[in-house]
Image (cartoon, helix red, strand yellow):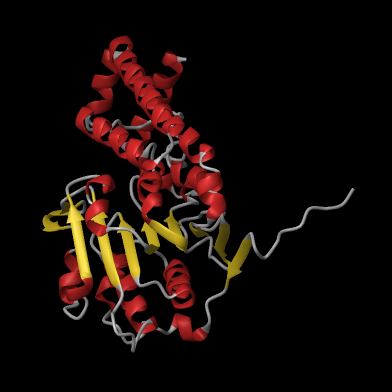
Amino acid sequence: MKSLSVSADSLEMITPSDKEINLLSNLDPAYVAVLEMTKSEREFVTALICRYKPRKLLELGVSAGGSSVLMMSAANKTNEGEEYPARLYAIDYAEKYYRNIKLSVGYIVDQYPELKPHYHIYSGGMAYRFLDLIGEDIDFCLIDTAHVNPGEILDFLMVLPYLKENAVVVLHDVGMHTSMSSKSFARRDLNHTTALLFSAICGKVLLPAFFSKTENNEMYFANVGAIVIDKTTREHLFGAFNLLTIRWSYKPSSREESEICEFFQRHYDQLFADFTARIFAYHNHYFTEARRRTPLVRKILRKALPLWAKTILARIYDRLLQ
């Protein structure tokens, strides 16, 4: 029997060059302190920007804005001399930085005034609310948001209609579910959303050729990856939509549900629009039944318990519903 081989057209291992690694060496390193990426992950993203030379970038999940600085700086250096500089559009559901609510999301970008004219940030809502303002022809997108269902799955499906052919979508935390660090281990049954999405999207896969297990919180696999969006991506969407049937850790509000369904009605075939409505109906039913059947457990979970205790109680809770 002939062994199966990997085509260079379907998967490429990325080894950043010295030039790519040193591209931002003269940049004020303040952003690194708040950028939730390891050194090898930063080099991977920088290498992709150098090679694909995007002009219209999108970021979902801004946090302090460290990745905004990285992407904008790399894109501007790569496109140096062009008549129009690269632009970055950033979206975050939150309005305040989750580690310090006195600060706004993306606050670190203020320390880089040269980037501000080409940086546009939107906060306080899901991506679908802002994408018409941003427009189409996005050629590079970083998604780093919830890491639990429906999180990045919904994010990707919202963004896809606005992506240019051969756009690069970078997914962060694709290996988080394999982390053996004490903090991540307790949530390993929840943090698989991005890995599932990464496996479901059709297109050329880009992976770092090297990563450090120690550097990546004791993860056994690379924690960042990318996919080049092409015709096959749009022709094979069932896998991504079907991921939305897996149990959710949170549920969008009724208003968001209505607006998401309307958004998908505009951008996808009726089959997928109907499927989305059925998915929401299922999860609404599930959350209602969960509240009705185990109200005491839910009250316990709301209390300020350690993460490991919440995880154990959540597993017991799930078993009660089976």
Q: Is residue 97 left or right of residue 178?
A: left
Is 43 positioned to the left or the right of 300 in the image? right
Image quadrant where residue 313 sits? top left
Identify whether 193 is placed above or below 97: above
Apparent side of residue 206 relative to residue 250 in the rendered image (left or right): right
What residue is rendered at 47% in x and 15% in y? 322
Q: Quadrant of residue 307?
A: top left
Residue lying furthest left in this view? 102
Res 115 → quadrant: bottom left
Question: Relative to 114, is 3 on the left or the right?
Answer: right
Camera sees residue 209: no
Give the image location of residue 68, x and y in percent.
28, 67
Q: Which residue occupies the extreme top position in the image?
A: 293
For the image, the number of numbered tags is 0
Residue 89, percent from left and from top = 26, 63
Q: Position of residue 237 (x, y in %)?
A: 51, 42
Residue 281 screen position, x and y as percent: 35, 21
* Residue name at image x 18 percent, y 74 percent: 116
